[in-house]
Amino acid sequence: MEKISVIYTEPRTFGKYDERNIIGYLNEEQVPDYLPEGAEEPVTGYKYTGTEKDGGTIMPCADATSYPEVTNAIIRAEYSESDEMAIHRHFTNDPEQYAEEWENYNECCEQAKLLAKKWLGME
């Protein structure tokens, strides 16, 4: 699926998309000295990369107020359940060979937890 990047002049978070999904703005990168179209002065821009035209990503999440569900939605944006199970199997069977894959997966999970807390105002 093609990824689309969009720059905003204000940080974005997430919101309810429909009854079963949220739309979140992932992969935030600050863009110093961003000059929006028609502006005279540069500002700090906030770039998000996702699957939607606005840079957002639609993620399955039935309860947008639940920390575990929002965290899981963020993780699922990067890893399917099948991918996650494969990573666990790989690391269990050969920790040395799959150490980097395991580390990347765990870093994603830690970042997802931090982002979910930020989005839900828990930090």
Image (cartoon, grey):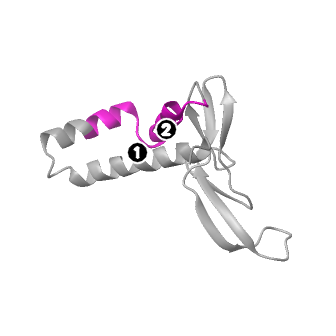
At x 63% / y 60%, what residue is drawn? 47
Q: Are marks 1 and 2 in contact (CB under 8 Å)?
A: yes
Q: Which residue is mark 1?
A: 109
Q: Earlier in the sequence, mark 1 or mark 2?
A: 2
At which x and y percent is residue 9? 74, 62
* Above or below for 49 versus 78: below
At x 16% / y 51%, what residue is drawn? 97
Magenta highlight range: 64-87
Q: Which quarter of the figure has residue 39?
A: bottom right
**For residue 71: magenta?**
yes
Identify residue type, mark 1: Cys
In the current view of this chain or complex, which residue is farthest to the front? 123
* Above or below for 21 versus 14: above
Q: Which residue is mark 2?
A: 71
Identify residue type, mark 2: Thr
* Above or below for 62 versus 27: above
Q: Is residue 90 left or right of residue 47?
A: left
